[in-house]
Amino acid sequence: MMRKPTINDVAKHANVSVTTVSLALSGKGRISEITIKKINEAIQELGYVRNKNAATLRSGHSAVIGVIVHDIRDPFYAGIITGINEVLVEQEYIIFLLQSDMTSAGLFKCVNSLIEQDVSGIILGSGGQIAHEIKTITDKHKIPLILVSQSSSVDNILLVRSDNRLGAKLATEYLISKGHRQIAYLGGRSDSLTRAERVAGFANALTKHGLKFKTEWVVADDYPEQLGNFEQLLKQYPNITAFLCHDTSTTLALILGASKLGRSIGKGGNTSYFEQQIEIFSFGTQSEIYLAKNLISYIDNQPIEIGRQAANNLLNSGSTLPEIVIEPRLITE
Amino acid sequence: MMRKPTINDVAKHANVSVTTVSLALSGKGRISEITIKKINEAIQELGYVRNKNAATLRSGHSAVIGVIVHDIRDPFYAGIITGINEVLVEQEYIIFLLQSDMTSAGLFKCVNSLIEQDVSGIILGSGGQIAHEIKTITDKHKIPLILVSQSSSVDNILLVRSDNRLGAKLATEYLISKGHRQIAYLGGRSDSLTRAERVAGFANALTKHGLKFKTEWVVADDYPEQLGNFEQLLKQYPNITAFLCHDTSTTLALILGASKLGRSIGKGGNTSYFEQQIEIFSFGTQSEIYLAKNLISYIDNQPIEIGRQAANNLLNSGSTLPEIVIEPRLITE
DNA sequence: CTGAAAGCGCTTACAG
DNA sequence: CTGAAAGCGCTTACAG
């Protein structure tokens, strides 16, 4: 076999027309059992593989969607992609994965590239305002666009996101319910919108329960050196008994700091105050925390579910809701 | 504009032939400045976007490669994809991302899907023997295949991988050089090949320096409950002063266990034995550890570099080496 | 430096 | 249930 076999070769080999083969492949016309069998045999013998480029070109439909994220190494987005993939595999769709710095220029390049490939939908990992410019383009090309994000919302574009505010609020209330009265928020970059929402939820829970929100007890980690700040905080305010941590890395740093000062970690609640025990509620994923889940509670933002919903809505162009919020799951065991 | 503009529309609008437009787009023929300007204006005005499906179909070349991994949430593979992407973006290539359970059936489906899309290369995240079956198929379709992996090698297929054995060995030797004599290996599933290689490197370093390799000091985490085993180990053998940890999750669990027993973590070497300090060397990535890098050393397997090399070799079909080993980087600061 | 024309491999009315 | 034929949007010899 010199040349790749085409649908023509299959047709000849099976003694039917190309129409029949095409119909059989796509399952559209009603083809007789016998014919199908003949065709399948021909496909087997020739080692025929359908050329989707040709099919897409002719039919105008691609069964490919594009996903653009900032950094695939971010567990949140990795989870989303897993969820998207789960849904798409079932529908025999396939993903183009692009990473973008989310600058205007970079994003335009990505979107253009996806349009060139004639994708039938785009999922963009961003809640930023730039999404509007993108939406203009995708609209012109009649390509559905869905945003997925940790936070924020954007007018008039379908967005599937997590609820950071709620996650932080529920976690804080959980800590309060266990008797903690001195709670701090640690980690995250201070320019992060996600962090701002979490801090808002944190503050909200405190105030709701008559506790005071102290800005000194909210420490960012804009620079690695701020790890020292966590230690400092522990030293300066030894009466803090519980922490909400922005991510696993922060949690790790906190535990190390605590350990240095001879404070242990546990889920004992405030009753163990005299043991100097610290209770931690961290944002994170199962794979990061599972080995430590006896001692640390965590908030799962459900990225996989976000991915699933985004994919489903893209394929069915279903939802007319402007935004779908996935509730966080608290793992306190 | 009702219909998507095609290369024909651009040609008419610019008063040139389609040949000229096509040549200008691909930068192949030498087209006069003036003509190029006219064409670009037409493209702008019409909002023309090239249809790559048609181009691929006609030219037989796709500028698309497929990447198949087991789980995109694995930081190692996420890093590899980042590296692949880095190289491909420069060459204006684009990635199809597939997740596979790496069973025979699942993998065949993925590969078939990629062949249907006419990819010009495949990178497979696996070192398993199944790669041979896949190689047979990709060979038949003349599609270059490169493997990327944590460990193991496969005959006759180009593989880019990390060197776990070496990473573990160097880390262990580092700990020994700091005076540690009682060192344990923690974490990883006991059926993991990667883990086996690391344990081999660990054992090798110990023996080389006249230390005894004790199987009781090598603890897996096949079940989450084995977290308790770490604690148990610490209790039973309080003279262990250093640990090699399989991943960040293991490290987290170890620190928690140590903290419970009043042992702190640091890079003090064995001199701080009487302070009960523990020194940790963990496999992991920068983003997982950076906040704690003052207290914990880590081995970076350089997934990004693995991805880069795999992509480069795929595009240039360059290397005739059967395997490229990327040396781990030890971050002890 | 530019144009007319064939053809990549498929899908899909249309006609039987 | 099946066939002959047009055409999706491009690239690429070939000829000028």
Image (spheres, coloured by chain):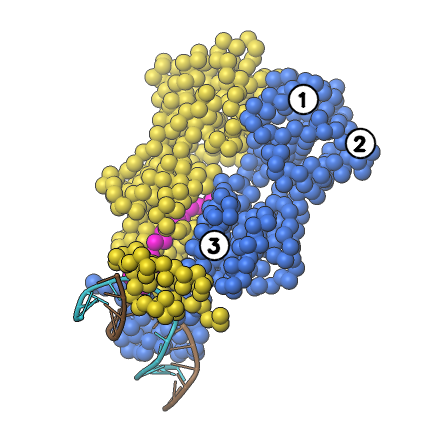
Chain colours: A blue, B yellow, C brown, D cyan
The answer to if B63 sits in the magenta stretch is: yes
Q: Is residue A88 left or right of residue B13?
A: right
- Mark 1 highlights which residue? A233
**Residue occupying image coordinates x 58% and y 59%:** A313
Q: Secondary structure at mark 3?
A: helix
Closer to the camera in the image, B33 or B129: B33
Estimate the spatial distance between the alpha carbons at disc 2 and disc 1, rounded to whole Å. 19 Å
**Residue occupying image coordinates x 63% and y 20%:** A231
- Mark 2 highlights which residue? A211
How would you rate the neighbour count of disc 1 (Cα within 10 Å): few for under 14, some for 14-19, many for 20 or more?
some
Residue B118 in the image: state x and y as whole percent. 34, 58
Closer to the camera in the image, B5 or A12: B5
Q: Is residue A268 visible?
A: no
Estimate the spatial distance between the alpha carbons at disc 2 and disc 3, rounded to whole Å. 47 Å
Q: Is residue A294 above or below residue A167?
A: above
Residue A327 in the image: state x and y as whole percent. 67, 48
The answer to the question of whether label 2 and label 3 lie on touching residues, with beta carbons closer than 8 A, is no
User: Which disc number belongs to residue A111?
Assistant: 3
> Which chain does the numbered disc 3 sit on?
A
Quadrant assignment, res B40:
bottom left
For the residues beneath circles 2 and 3, the answer to whether they share a chain is yes
> Which chain does the numbered disc 2 sit on?
A
State the extent of the magenta-drawn residues as a range. B56-73
